[in-house]
Amino acid sequence: MDDKSNKLLLIPVLAVLFVMIGYQYICPADSTSCRLRSGQSSGAFSPLLSQYSPGLDGDADAREPDEQGPGTFPSKFNFTIEDLERHVEFDIKGSDVIVFLHIQKTGGTTFGRHLVRNIHLERPCDCKPGQKKCTCHRPGKADSWLFSRFSTGWSCGLHADWTELTSCVPAVMNKKQRKDVPQQRRNFYYITLLRDPVSRYLSEWKHVQRGATWKTALHMCDGRPPTPAELPACYSSEDWTGVSLADFMACQSNLANNRQTRMLADLSLVGCYNLSSMSEGRRAELLLDSAKRNLQRMAFFGLTEFQRKTQFLFERTFGLRFIAPFTQINSTRAAGVAVDPAVRLRIEGLNALDVQLYEYARELFLRRVQHCHQQERRRERARKREQRRRMWEHRASQLRQWGGEEEEGREEEGKERIMGVTEDYSSQVVRW
């Protein structure tokens, strides 16, 4: 009798369990499909990103707790989903090449070292002590997958810009290839770093003040370097050691002015360094538009002010992983320079194009990081839903199996009762 009661009690328990499993499958914990709509936005970017990607879940704007999110400022640029999508099927064993455009004083030296010393690779770069350059060959090939200062050196000139690199890199890579190996078509993925224009400008001034020069830079454009008349020197001595900030700002031909825009733009569009080829306003407009376009089309760019996000976006773009995490260092020489508001305004005026470019780059960068996080969360939710579905199917199969076993138990019990009655009747017949 007790066994029968236990079996009868098991049926409603299993039914409740079945309903609970089904509810979890239909209405998972992170779904908004079973909740009342509050109509509240989760961030300043949520309406825009919902417009780009219909059907985003309510927690799509969730961010890492210790990082500043893009929802802290309003949107200014109408980026499309194609602008935000950045994933490269980087074939390090094939013919793909990462080309690092290193702009002065943007943290490029640190990032360049990360590329050659801090990436998980099947064949790590060979960096010998005491040597600046490392050998970054592909697995099984004597062919470099990285074109940068610390791998191939300044092969296209000191701090070569976009104009120089795009016309020089393919030829240089072909020359480095072994003669007995047939020429192959390479995919070049350009990357760079940008920095807040005022901080970058002050950092360059302090660097020059200590005696640094880039006199050996080629500045090639349309097959020739600029003439002394097109690019007059700011100083007549060997270097500009001890230059004051006022004198640094006073030189009209100082390449520190709007350096990031100039180095990312196609200078052929504006007559290279010939300032008389068009009006100043038209030249500025073409330079800025070209720099924005080239930056947007690059495989990747990072921001000095967001080291962790830069690491995150690079890893997700190329499918490569760094060994040690990036660190944010804010105690730079530029940070130690105290400038009054009037001087800051003067620097911003000298770098007006860089200020606009950086504003564009900052929003694009943060939106790409956010978009990448959202994609990862979607994939994780899909994985969990699939996991719950399989668990539900497994539990449902068990329920069906238990139901069949219970039915068999009932049949066996019925047979036993019939056999018992038959035996009793037989015994009575014998007794009679």
Image (cartoon, rainbow, N blue to C red):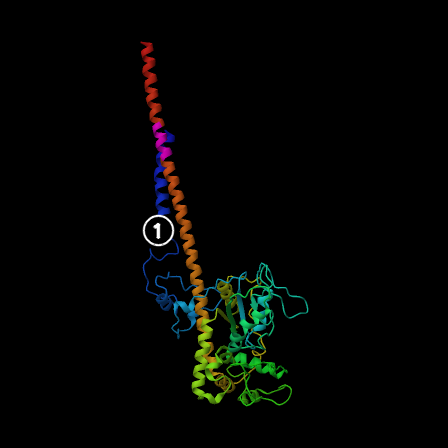
Instruction: Check disc 1 and report its element: helix, strand or loop.
Output: helix
Q: Quadrant of residue 157?
A: bottom right
Q: Characterize the local packing of mark 1: few (<14), some (14-19) or many (20 or more) Cα atoms within 10 angstroms.
A: some
**Residues rendered magenta in the picture:** 404-411
As for residue 399 lying within the magenta part, the answer is no
Q: Is residue 87 left or right of residue 15?
A: right
* x then y, percent, for residue 18: 36, 44
User: What is the quadrant of the N terminus in the image?
Assistant: top left
* x then y, percent, for residue 103: 54, 76
The mark tally for this picture is: 1
The answer to whether residue 421 is above or below residue 261 is above
Residue in view at x 34 percent, y 20 percent: 420
Q: Is residue 195 visible?
A: no
Residue at which label 1 appears: 26
Closest to the observer, 306 or 427 = 306
Callout 1, which amino acid? Answer: Ile
Closest to the observer, 245 or 283 = 283
